[in-house]
Amino acid sequence: MNAAALDRSMEPTAGVETMKAIVQDAYGTAPEEVLRLAEIARPTIEDGDVLVRVAAASVDRGTWHLMAGQPYLIRLVSGLRRPKITNPGHCVAGTIVAIGKDVTGLAVGDEVFGIADGSFAEYAVARPGKLAPKPASLSFEKAAAVPVSALTALQAVRDRGQVQPGQKVLIIGASGGVGTFAVQIAKAFGAEVTGVSSPAKAELVRSLGADHVVDYTREDFAGGERRYDVILDIGGNSKLSHLRRALTPRGRLVIVGGETDGRWFGGIDRQLRATLLSPLVRQKLGTFVASENAADLVTFRDLVDAGKVAPVIDRTYPLDEAAAAVRHVQDGHARGKVVVTVG
């Protein structure tokens, strides 16, 4: 069945409120083969949850990892043989339509953005601690582009990189979902920013405020005399020795991402090696898992309201083309974020 076709074979029992949603029954690396649109029962909430009518959701690399079940280590959480998470959507922007009796600080009708379970759908369940009021200056589409990528960038720059005014910061993968946020946040923190990208995306990186752009097809970021106080490796696969060569003697390396073809580890082994090596050298080397929390969503909202940061959207897709949206990110074509519009 075509991934964009509405699957009527999963129609719920008569009388049950339904919705359209993307679903998957098996792992697979090709989104058009495993993701499909279906009519399913609308989710119900527990006492500590809220129900969001989804206006838009966004795609990130984690979407593909959940869909594919790779690296295989992820299946310890998502299901060994079949996915427990049958809708890989994670980021959301929309309007609250129901709240559990234990929820405080939120109300029906509030426009919010943040993290929700199964956000490639007309309705999604979320925890209050992972939602924040939508920035008034952002559309739902732009707000949906924020949560995972912006939180990752903020915590990489502020917490792990500990970026200070005047420091030289290198961002590898500066044109992607996390990278476009990281460039802007590092500039907002007063850093001198160098972005690494392809030549086709160099102008985008400059437009975000990068002071310098390195074309990785023609230039080695570690080949010259320039050294960096902080390196955020978001989209690269450079060896640790190569990255360390570009750092100052007491610089900080934060490995945010980096993909390999390894089905078991998928690049995680490099992050583990950096963490193990760090106590043995003067440079600070490591990685982290981003915290999904409302407080940092509010911090980012304040940066948006101050005009210091803005989401970059490459393109949008309707819900029935969610598989194509995931494919676009998977193939590495996106400049900034890819958004799925729902309502």
Image (cartoon, rainbow, N blue to C red):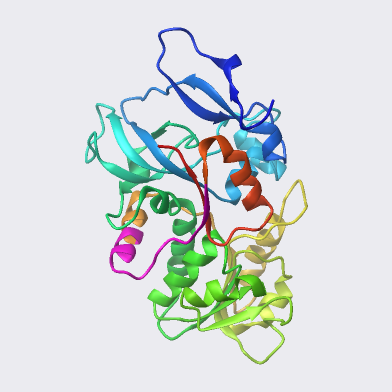
Please report the residue visible at 72 percent of the width from the left and 40 percent of the height from the top. Answer: 30
23, above or below 281, in the image: above
Q: Relative to residue 144, is residue 261 drawn left or right?
A: right
Residue 319 place in picture, x, y as percent:
52, 37
Q: Which residues are magenta?
A: 300-316
Q: Does residue 323 appear in the picture of this structure?
A: yes
Q: Does residue 160 appear in the picture of this structure?
A: no
Please report the residue visible at 59 percent of the width from the left and 80 percent of the height from the top. Answer: 213
- Residue most toward the bottom? 225
Please report the residue visible at 43 percent of the width from the left and 54 percent of the height from the top. Answer: 146
Q: Relative to residue 70, is residue 78 drawn left or right?
A: left
26, above or below 227, in the image: above
Residue 55 place in picture, x, y as percent:
39, 40
Residue 147 or residue 276, whichever sits in front: 147
Q: Relative to residue 48, is residue 165 drawn left or right?
A: right
Residue 302 among those drawn in magenta: yes
Residue 206 or residue 302, whichever sits in front: 206
Residue 220 place in picture, x, y as percent:
72, 81
Residue 332 among those drawn in magenta: no
Please identify the quadrant where the C terminus is shown.
top left
- Residue most toward the top? 14
Residue 172 place in picture, x, y as percent:
61, 71
Please identify the quadrant where the N terminus is shown.
top right
Please report the residue visible at 36 percent of the width from the left and 54 percent of the height from the top. Answer: 297
